[in-house]
Image: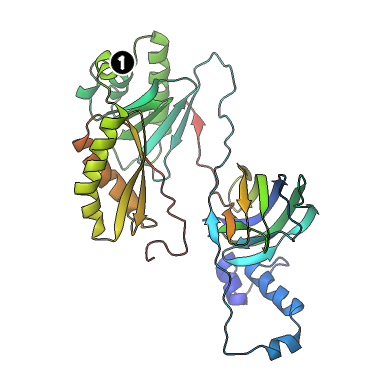
């Protein structure tokens, strides 16, 4: 047990164990104390007992507001993704109500003052505007420190809002697709392109919801819990969706990749 | 998956309470809470904590062995090694003999003002 304890706690071999014990040890101790010897001896040895498998429920986290209410100031928070490939900027006011828009390059930003300004920054690769957020990917994938670029992006967002011009071009707003158009297009590409592609790995993709032109998907089967799911999502699914339905905006993944006992192999 | 030093829960029960001891499941180990105050009876608040000193793969609150437990709110305070202590609030859930609810949340991703 000391060996296991060392593994879990990083303790060296010659170190004395601390008074506190691990959860695993406490379980064992409790079993020893609470199980009378006579009862243990009387149990049939051929019948191993297994723990009850219960269904694990997921419930929403109640998030508190990240900004003080009723602030006249333009407040912006930057939140780099855990993988460092993109950074989410949340603003304390709406940038595009009810819809989202993906700017793949500088040319696509024509007439949209916010995206034009952001693409003028050297390292900005793509821009996604959704409700009160902006998601940026950068050209230089080797840089992990977002702080310098994030400050420039924050300044650009703040100044563009203060200038008062329309953040998204009127042409884009006028040509926004209906939810039904988005749903049909995305479902079609899932059925004829994406799902046949991931089926070879035992995976499947479901369209959960469409709101405005933003879609929410869920990865199931072999995709759920797979270590390559992020790559599949960003390089496979995003590309397929945006090629088939160019006016699709944000693509959210609601898969819980930690759920289940052994999701990839089940 | 950080190493959890201790965690403390506060469970606010709604009109559907239960009288069994409250257990949690850490990395598939079913455990009772320590330092327990209050109860899981209707309208009451249960508080308990545990000194874990192990790496978190899963952490759930287990439903009663019989009957139902209607939870209005769960607040969990985590103290993990190398992380600033953080608190997460979960919404309501109904538990029974076949269910448990996930109460593990990774430390929050760093966000900063720009």
The answer to whether residue A24 is above or below residue B98 is: below
- Closest to the observer, A4 or B31: B31
Q: Is residue A248 visible?
A: no
**Horizontal side, residue B88 vs residue A111: left or right:** right
Circle 1 packing at 10 Å, graded few (<14), some (14-19), many (20+), is many
- Closest to the observer, B108 or B12: B12
Which quadrant would residue A20 be assigned to in this image? bottom right
- Closest to the observer, A254 or A105: A254
Residue A21 percent across, percent down from the top left: 68, 67
The answer to whether residue A253 is above or below residue A172 is: below
Q: Residue at x 72, y 45 (%)?
A: B15
- Closest to the observer, B2 or A191: A191
Residue A231 percent across, percent down from the top left: 30, 49
Q: Is residue B96 visible?
A: yes
| Location of the N terminus of chain A (image quadrant) | bottom right
Q: Residue at x 68, y 59 (%)?
A: B67
Q: Residue at x 25, y 36 (%)?
A: A184
**Horizontal side, residue B56 vs residue A28: left or right:** left
Residue A72 percent across, percent down from the top left: 54, 13
Q: Chain of mark 1?
A: A
- Mark 1 residue element: helix
Residue A185 percent across, percent down from the top left: 23, 36
Q: Name the residue beneath numbered marker 1.
A: A113
Coloration mode: rainbow
């Amino acid at each position: 047990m000391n060996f296991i304890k060392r593994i879990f706690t990083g303790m060296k071999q010659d170190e004395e164990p601390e008074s506190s014990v691990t959860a695993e040890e406490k379980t064992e101790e409790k079993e020893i104390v609470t199980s009378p010897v006579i009862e243990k001896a009387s149990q049939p040895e051929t019948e191993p007992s297994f723990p009850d498998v219960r269904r694990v429920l997921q419930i929403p986290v109640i998030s508190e507001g990240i900004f003080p209410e009723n602030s006249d100031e333009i407040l912006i928070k930057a939140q780099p993704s855990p993988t460092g490939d993109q950074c989410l900027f949340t603003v304390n006011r709406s940038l595009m109500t009810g819809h989202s828009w993906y700017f793949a390059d500088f040319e696509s930003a024509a007439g949209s003052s916010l995206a034009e300004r952001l693409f003028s920054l050297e390292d900005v690769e793509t821009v996604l505007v959704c409700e009160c957020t902006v998601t940026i990917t950068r050209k230089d994938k080797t840089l992990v420190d977002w702080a310098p670029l994030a400050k420039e992006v924050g300044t650009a967002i703040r100044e563009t809002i203060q200038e008062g011009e329309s953040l998204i071009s009127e042409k884009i707003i006028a040509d926004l697709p209906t939810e039904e158009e988005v749903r049909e297009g995305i479902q079609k590409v899932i059925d004829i392109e994406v799902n046949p592609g991931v089926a070879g790995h035992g995976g499947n993709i479901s369209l959960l919801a469409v709101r405005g032109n933003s879609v929410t998907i869920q990865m199931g089967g072999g995709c759920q819990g797979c270590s390559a799911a992020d790559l599949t999502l960003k390089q496979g699914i995003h590309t397929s969706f945006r090629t088939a339905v160019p006016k699709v905006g944000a693509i959210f993944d609601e898969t819980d990749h930690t759920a289940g006992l052994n999701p990839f192999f089940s | 998956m950080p190493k959890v030093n201790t965690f403390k829960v506060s469970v606010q029960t709604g009109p559907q309470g239960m009288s069994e001891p409250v257990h949690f499941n850490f990395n598939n180990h079913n455990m009772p809470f320590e330092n327990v105050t209050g109860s899981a009876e209707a309208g009451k608040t249960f508080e308990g904590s545990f000194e874990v000193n192990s790496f978190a793969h899963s952490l759930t609150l287990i439903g009663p062995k019989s009957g139902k437990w209607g939870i209005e709110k769960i607040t969990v305070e985590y103290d993990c090694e190398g992380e600033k202590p953080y608190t997460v609030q979960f919404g309501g859930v109904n538990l029974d003999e076949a269910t448990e609810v996930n109460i593990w949340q990774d430390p929050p991703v760093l966000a900063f003002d720009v």
